[in-house]
Image (spheres, rainbow, N blue to C red):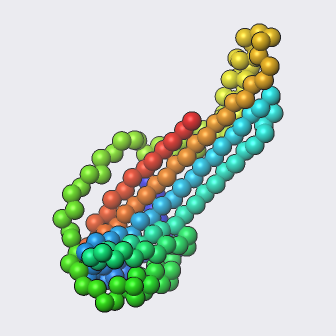
Amino acid sequence: MNDFFTKTDLSRQDAENIISETLNKCDDGELYLENSKSESILLDDNKIKSSIYSSDLGYGLRAVTGEVIAYSHSNEISKNSLKQSAENLSSTLKSKKGVYNNEIPKTNKKFYKNVNPIEEKSLNSKLELLKEVNNYTRAKGGIVQQVTASFSGEHKFIEIIRSGGEVLTDARPLIR
């Protein structure tokens, strides 16, 4: 689980208030928060050729009224940033009037456990696994000329906050 509101001046209540006010005269919309981490390790002929780690955090705010869709996003989760996004959306939709639909069907079925494959094992254990694959393959005899093994992992945690405080969450682990 991730809490997008621990390292910012934006509280969950502030976010819910800004969203409800912004989407008041819209047909639909939401605040989409995402925390994404990924890593990749490539072992080629007994050498680590590359090791990459990435971490991204941000949000998107969407409002829909009739045929008009307004969208604003930022990688800064703060009260000021969300207020600015809300103002941008309101400006785009200022001449539109809608009725917010609170009756959207819920289909948020969980397909995965909330396991973070990047943090589940240490870097050393991942390197050891790649070395085991390398050694196993090389032990098959002289026919093996080159061994390339890789590990890739990704974890995304999203939270969607709709008008009225409805919250949907999802964890998306991936490992290859």
Q: Is residue 52 shown left or right of residue 168? A: right
Q: Residue at x 73, y 29 (%)?
A: 148
**Placement of the C terminus among the 4 image quadrants:** top right
Relative image position of residue 83 (x, y in whole percent): 44, 83
Extreme residue toward the top, this view: 141
- Nearer to me, 118 or 107: 107
Q: Is residue 128 visible?
A: no
Extreme residue toward the front, this view: 67
Q: Is residue 74 visible?
A: yes
Up/down of 141 relative to 80, above or below: above
Extreme residue toward the left, this view: 103
Relative image position of residue 82 (x, y in whole percent): 46, 79
**Placement of the N terminus among the 4 image quadrants:** bottom left
Q: Is residue 12 shown left or right of residue 130? A: left
- Nearer to me, 22 or 89: 89
Up/down of 135 relative to 149, above or below: above
Up/down of 57 relative to 155, above or below: below
Relative image position of residue 96 (x, y in whole percent): 28, 85
Q: Residue at x 77, y 12 (%)?
A: 143
Q: Residue at x 58, y 42 (%)?
A: 153
Up/down of 129 relative to 83, above or below: above
Q: Is residue 132 shown left or right of residue 4? A: right
Relative image position of residue 142 (x, y in whole percent): 80, 11
Quadrant assignment, res 22: bottom left
Q: Residue at x 70, y 34 (%)?
A: 127
